[in-house]
Amino acid sequence: MASSRLAQQFPSLFGPSRRAAWRLSLARRALAVTAILLALHLGVGATRPPEAAPAPTTQRAGPELSLPLALPADHLAPGDTVAVYLPGRGSPIATGARVSGTSQTPSGGTVARVTLRRSDVEPILRHMGTSGPSQGGFVLVADG
C-alpha cells in the first residue's frame, strides 16, 4: 500500500499493517462525510432568509411623551435608549429614555414618542413651557 500523509504523520496509527489500512480508510471516509455535511450546512445557511429583527417590546416601563425635536432623529430606531438634551446645553435633562417611534407633524417638524422614567417627566415638561418647547425642541442622543 502506498504511503499517505496521514500514515506519515501518524505512523503508529496508520502504519503498513492491514488493520492500519482499515483505520486509514475509515478516517478518509469520516473526513469525506464531514466535508459533505459542512458543505450542506453552509449551503442551507446561505439560502435561508435572514431572521427578522425582534419586535420591540410593547411593555412600557413608564409614561410616554411626544417630544418636538430640534434635529431629525432618522438615526434612531424604536427601542433605542437615548438621552434627552436641550440645544446648547451640555448636560442631559433625562437619561435612559426609550424611543417608541418618530413622526412628522403637518407643519414639517419632527416629533419623537419617548418612554421615560416618572422622575424625568417633570423636568421635561418644565422646559416645554406653555408656549411650546424653548429653543425649538429637544435633541435625542443615542446611548451607546
Image (cartoon, rainbow, N blue to C red):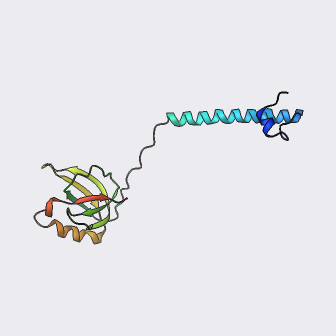
- Left or right? Give the position of 34 relative to 48: right
| Residue sticking out furthest to the left | 131
Instruction: Identify which residue, 128 or 136, lies in the foreground.
Output: 136
Q: Residue at x 23, y 51 (%)?
A: 72
Q: Quadrant of the N terminus?
A: top right
Answer with the quarter of the image where residue 33 lies: top right
- Left or right? Give the position of 98 relative to 49: left
Spot occupied by residue 57 in the image (x, y as percentages of width and height): 38, 55
Tag count: 0
- Left or right? Give the position of 97 relative to 52: left
Spot occupied by residue 69 in the image (x, y as percentages of width and height): 20, 56
| Residue sticking out furthest to the top | 1
Q: Quadrant of the C terminus?
A: bottom left
| Residue sticking out furthest to the right | 17
- Left or right? Give the position of 53 relative to 101: right
Answer with the quarter of the image where residue 128 lies: bottom left
Instruction: Identify which residue, 49 or 75, lies in the foreground.
Output: 75
Instruction: Identify which residue, 36 or 90, lies in the foreground.
Output: 90
Instruction: Identify which residue, 97 or 64, lies in the foreground.
Output: 97
Spot occupied by residue 26 in the image (x, y as percentages of width and height): 78, 34
Q: Is residue 132 above or below residue 28?
A: below
